[in-house]
Image (spheres, rainbow, N blue to C red):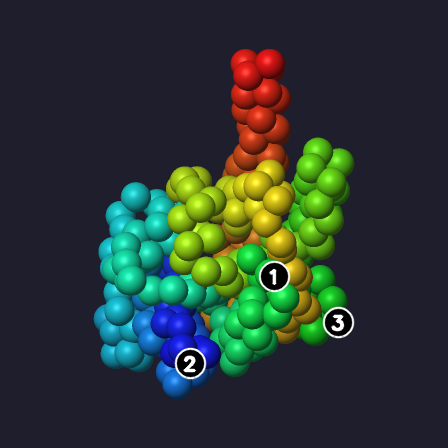
Amino acid sequence: MFRGHTVAVIIPALDEEDTIAGVIRQVDRDLVDWVVVGDNGSRDGTAKVAIQAGALVVREDRRGYGSACLKAITAVPEVEILVFLDADGGDDPTEIPLLLEALFSGDTDVVIGSRVGEKAEPGSLTFLQKFGNQLTCTLVRWLWGVRYTDLGPFRTLRRSTFDQLGMQDPDYGWTIEMQVKAAQTGLSVLEVPVTYRNRLAGQSKVSGTILGSWRAGKRILGYVFEAKAKELFSRKKMG
């Protein structure tokens, strides 16, 4: 519990048996009430290892980053604060308090851990990730006038804010959906520099292959243009 508020850490995971336990064990359980792993149909021992490390595991066979997150959240309906991070060890769970403190500073609605600063390990972000981040953030600034530096997975927000956003994307559009909807609704988003490390083991489902990078990039950029088109159509219809 953090400042009297219940906290759940949400970790989407697919075939991460070699990394998931280390991530879970780095979470400060004095601050976090639940660690929930959204097992996205893993074929290895991800679920078993996560349970042994002290997490609650919820299985979602429909493949997709957003699907795993959405399913995991259903396991903690009464939680007040949600924290999202990845299962590969790239995010540093010991920095969860940094994000929680930022959430309670001023009128902040959403906190995003930005990986583009000096705290990122060399090689932890590929060229394609950096390029995609910059391109997407530039488009968001042009289209909605909100400045972001990263689409990093490590983030936190209140459950009430999450419900307000009405998150739906089942795939890799999840992170940009949250940021675009925050921009559209005028929420206050604060970016905090965070550590970003090379994954502890295995291969990334996104940056580890050209195909994975292409699919993720296509979905992320597609979401941006779809969101703007829907916004313009809605305005025209109302006018």
Residue 83 horizontal side relative to residue 73, left or right: right
Answer whether labels 2 and 1 touch (C-beta < 8 Å): no
Select label 1 or label 3 by which is in front: 1
Residue, disc 1: 107
Upstream in sequence: badge 2 or badge 3: 2
Of tags 2 and 3, which is closer to the observer?
A: 2
Instruction: Give the image location of residue 186, x and y in percent.
Output: 62, 44
Question: Which residue position is annotated with label 2?
Answer: 31
Q: What amino acid is at disc 2? A: Leu
In primary-sequence order, the first of circles 1 and 3 is 1
Q: Confirm whether residue 74 shows in the render.
A: yes
* Occupied quadrant, residue 44: bottom left
Q: Callout 2: 10 Å neighbours few (<14), some, many (20+)?
A: some
Residue 238 horizontal side relative to residue 160, left or right: right
Question: Which residue is tagged 3?
Answer: 118
Q: Name the one closer to the observer, 86 or 187.
A: 187
Which label sits in the foreground, 2 or 1?
Answer: 1
The amino acid sitting under disc 3 is: Glu
At 30% from the left edge and 79% from the top edge, which residue is drawn?
A: 53
As helix, strand or loop, the secondary structure at mark 3 comes to: loop
Label 3 neighbour load within 10 Å: few <14, some 14-19, many 20+: few
Per the model, the C-alpha gap separating discs 2 and 1 is 21 Å
Q: Given the image, on which type of amino acid does mark 1 rest?
A: Asp
Q: How far apart are marks 2 and 3 (CA)?
A: 27 Å
Q: Is residue 235 above or below residue 144?
A: above
Q: What element carries label 2?
A: loop
